[in-house]
Image (spheres, rainbow, N blue to C red):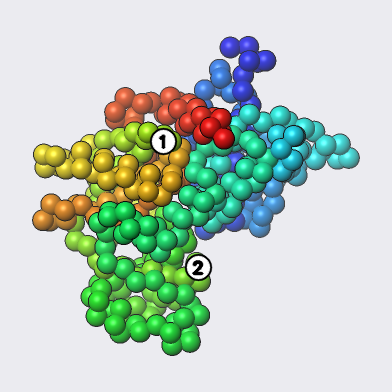
Amino acid sequence: MSNTMKKTAVIIFGGESSEYEVSLRSSAFIINNIDREKYNVYTLGITKDGRWLFYEGDIDSIENNSWIEKNTVSAIISPDKLEKSLLVFKGEKIEKIKIDIIFPVMHGKNGEDGTIQGIFEMADIAYVGCTPLAGAMCMDKAITNTICDAAGIPQAKWVAFTKYELDNNKVDLKSAVDYLKFPIFVKPANAGSSVGITKAHNEEELEKALEVAFKEDRKVVLEETLVGREIECAVMGNSEPVASCVGEILPTAEFYDYEAKYINDSTGLAIPAELPEGVEAKVQEAAKKAYLALNCSGLSRVDFFLLDDGRICLNELNTLPGFTSISMFPKLFAKVGVPYSELIDRLLAYAEEKHNEK
């Protein structure tokens, strides 16, 4: 394909989230696997302190976080919908790079929660992933739980409250414990990749767990512990989403934490999971139901528990799941015949489809 026929894709990585390092790994994986015959690829990095930098260096420097001081200049995405451009500040000159599509490979706060997607909406540029509304709903575990309860999707019992409510005696913590029973998972309402999540077995551990969770967010969610197998299903698409096969997490840690997800590749992944007859289809349908209930588009990884009695319960939904070489999302679709390059190509196509529906 000639250079003039190629589309221009901007991959955004980094961000102020606690999942900054995960984003670097995910973006390097995507940059390495995107079809260069179809796309001219530019990279825009956001530092932990919020600087936007146009990056023209090697991919390895992104992955090992040495990219910031190499071949970078300030840049922003213009919110002017007539521009549809990346503005790169080179000395006294401003270079405009016309954009066809954006792939925000950013996990967690300000990347996955609808914040940066609002800029893309203002700029009227196609982008991979959920809308600002869907991203915000899915990022907040309390909102997600509320919507899924209303949609009739089974999940763990839960209680949510803010730090203000706890500090001002507006929360009956004892009643919450009596309702949920120890051990209890304590989670920041708005965080991802298991950051800030602790399993509390008693009141002393609960107090410490709340301190950890409140460092990540002003609101926390307490959930009962479900004993069962951790299974996951990848979903992609817009109005008619498709589901992958179902995989299973075989963690070495007590739960599938941040390190197990992105650093320690000794964590076992069973793809596909060995499941009783009919369970995979049930998980796939529940995953698509949750995806549509939360108005998702583009992609998500939907996580469930398979309980000993055969029931499935929703754990969480990730609108921009990990995209590293050891991540479940790309592996699940690869198993059903969608290789990494084609998967990225389809996600970019779904982004344009969504944009053209306006």
Alpha carbon separation for disc pair 1 and 2: 32 Å
Question: Could you say whether the residue bearing mark 1 is in a helix, strand or loop?
Answer: loop
For residue 18, say whether it is visible. Answer: yes
Which residue is disc 1 drawn over? Answer: 239
* 89 relative to 317, above or below: above
Foreground residue, 354 or 236?
354
Dot 1, crowdedness within 10 Å: few (<14), some or many (≥20)?
few
Residue at 43% over, 88% down: 169
Foreground residue, 68 or 132?
132
Residue at 65% over, 37% down: 124
Looking at numbered disc 1 in the image, what kind of residue is underneath it? Ser
In the rendered structure, the answer to whether residue 187 lies left or right of residue 73 reads left
Q: Position of residue 215 (x, y in %)?
A: 50, 71
In the picture, the quarter occupied by the C terminus is top right
Foreground residue, 218 or 229?
218
Q: Residue furthest bottom?
A: 169
Question: Could you say whether the residue bearing mark 2 is in a helix, strand or loop?
Answer: loop
Looking at numbered disc 2 in the image, what kind of residue is underneath it? Asp
Residue at 50% over, 68% down: 217
In the rendered structure, the answer to whether residue 130 lies left or right of residue 270 reads right
* 256 relative to 70, above or below: below
Foreground residue, 218 or 272?
218
Disc assigned to residue 96 = none
In the rendered structure, the answer to whether residue 122 lies left or right of residue 287 reads right
Residue at 24% over, 66% down: 225
Which residue is disc 2 drawn over? Answer: 217
On the image, which quarter does residue 152 sit in?
A: bottom left
Q: Position of residue 142 (x, y in %)?
A: 40, 64
